[in-house]
Amino acid sequence: MHMSIQLKRMIGKLRTVDLIIEVHDARVPITGRNPQFYSSLYAIRPHILVMNKMDLINKDLRKPIEDYYRDNGITNLVWTNCKKRLKKPLTDLQNMMLQCLREEPRFNRTVKTEYQVMVVGIPNVGKSSLINSLRLTNLGNNQKAVEEGARPGVTVRVQNRVRIFDQPLIYILDTPGVLNPLARDADGAMKLALCNLILESATQVHYVADYLLYWLNRTGDHSYVEFFNLHNGPSDDIQKVLLDLCQSNDLRFQSYIAGRRAERWDIDKAAKLFINMFRNNKLRDHCLDIDLLCDYISKNE
């Protein structure tokens, strides 16, 4: 289903919603957010921004990220790691949810003894994981209420509500992420692809590997050389790096040319391994927006 239709459906449900929780990937704290959300949803409902996968970025970056969003009108920000279901981050989120719900008037709602919360965000940032973490923490139900997946777009429609609190009674809606293609430049698209926040079919694996190499060299991180035991050291040429990776790790595939079998270097597999080094958290820091944060800090010094 087209995402603009999904956005309209979510807006239509606002009359039943008391709070909006936006889940986002801490590796792209600025780039990936959808500006349509703010104008269409956040302006008329209380809003909490949840930065998920907090363990994948340097702790020192949390304050400048919080400062950036405070300067942009967002004061309710919580850090989480939903896959590990850490107790303190979930408790912080619960307390902020209760505070927002108790302080805000319930617009266009009849008097009821229950609340309803909407979860939004771009694809694959951990919305379903957050809902299941809250459900388990509060109700002790280990059965997953919402399907989770390691690819974007697992949740394909606005789901039925899921109970996550008993005291007070709170229900939550899980919604598919809405990614605004008009908000993406080439650099931003590569960041989203590298974090697996857009479908693989929307990008070329070699372009994503090339962007990762560019980002690593730009930030002075040459750990990929040791990680893959590359013989020729750092390079700005992705083809040279992938060939070195094949030769250093004996990555080959068999093909047939004119009926004869031949072995070739598996460049495609090398590119996927190179990308998975980032996605499998093998680097020292995974914040792809470090350049944007540095620009923000320099402007405010």
Image: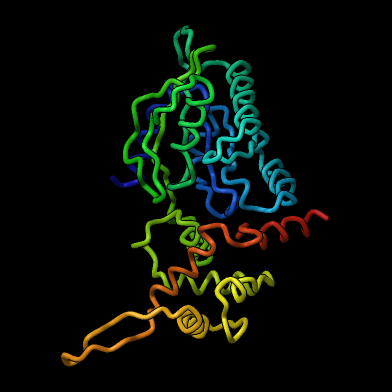
The x and y percentages for residue 282 are 58, 61
Residue at x 44%, y 23% (from the top left corner) = 141
Asked if residue 112 lies left or right of residue 97, the reply is left
Q: Quadrant for the N terminus, please.
A: top left
Q: Quadrant of residue 226?
A: bottom right
Q: Quadrant for the C terminus, please.
A: bottom right
Name, please, the residue furthest toward the right. Answer: 301
Q: How many marks?
A: 0
The x and y percentages for residue 272 are 43, 68
Residue at x 44%, y 51% (from the top left corner) = 180
Residue at x 48%, y 71% (from the top left corner) = 209
The x and y percentages for residue 171 are 45, 20
Q: Quadrant of residue 24?
A: top right
Name, please, the residue furthest toward the front. Answer: 250
Asked if residue 49 lies left or right of residue 124, the reply is right
The x and y percentages for residue 254 are 28, 82
- Name above or below for residue 220 compared with residue 50: below
Asked if residue 67 lies left or right of residue 192, the reply is right
Tell me which colouring the rendered structure shows.
rainbow
- Name above or below for residue 168 compared with residue 151: above
Q: Depth check: give the residue in front, 148 or 206.
A: 148
Residue at x 45%, y 53% (from the top left corner) = 197
Name, please, the residue furthest toward the left. Answer: 259
Q: Depth check: give the residue in front, 109 or 272.
A: 272
